[in-house]
Image (cartoon, rainbow, N blue to C red):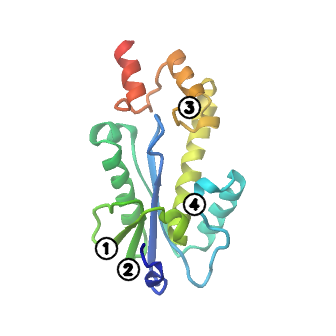
Amino acid sequence: MENLEQYKSIAKLAGCDEVGRGPLVGDVVAAAVILDPARPIAGLADSKKLSEKKREYLYQQIIDNALCYALGRASAQEIDQINILHASMLAMQRSILGLSIAPQMVLVDGNRCPKIDYPCVAIVKGDAKVAAISAASILAKVVRDREMLALHALHPEYGFDRHKGYPTKDHMAALVKYGPLPGYRKSFKPVKMLLATS
């Protein structure tokens, strides 16, 4: 069990998380956030545990009150080239490098750190334990969900507004019926198998 208290005194502590490892379509999106200790944000939690309305509210709170934040991403093409794990690390690395303030320390959600020149610690379930990681998970999730809603507006028959690109039963049925769009991850098994048979 990590002693998370030791990080409380670090003024420029960046939290980093990514969203979108599981979906069959779209980018994997990461965010890095340095919260302002003078302006704490109430209600930060793992983005998956929050309602959409609450996430949208907190998203704005983070944008308005954080010392700085940045987004990073890796495209479906990059995911196909280097695999989802490496693409997730790349997205996180890009978000951390995008911060306008250099962090003294970076805490990332999960069990491994991206390649960066800052001290970095990976914390399993960090999005539920560390406010800055929670904030990063909320930013990344809201941004990615909005992109799925934009995709839904263009291609409503796939139901992206409901499944957000995850391989649900409905999504798989639509994928078989209509075929993969350009943003699909061709290396992911369901898409790969479909392309092999078509």
Q: CA distance from mark 1 to mark 2?
A: 7 Å
Residue to which mark 3 is pinned: 168
Residue at horizontal 55 percent and vertical 71 percent from the top: 131
Query: What residue type is disc 3 on?
Result: Thr
Residue at horizontal 41 percent and vertical 26 percent from the top: 191
Quadrant for the C terminus in the image: top left
Name the element at disc 2.
Answer: loop
* Pointers 1 and 3 in contact (C-beta within 8 Å): no
Q: CA distance from mark 4 to mark 2?
A: 23 Å
Q: CA distance from mark 4 to mark 3?
A: 22 Å
Mark with earlier residue (1, 3)? 1
Residue to which mark 4 is pinned: 46
Mark with earlier residue (3, 2)? 2
The disc placed on residue 118 is: 1
Name the element at disc 4.
Answer: loop
Mark 2: few/some/many CA within 10 Å (<14, 14-19, 20+): few
Q: Is residue 95 left or right of residue 69?
A: left
Q: Is residue 163 left or right of residue 126?
A: right
The disc placed on residue 104 is: 2
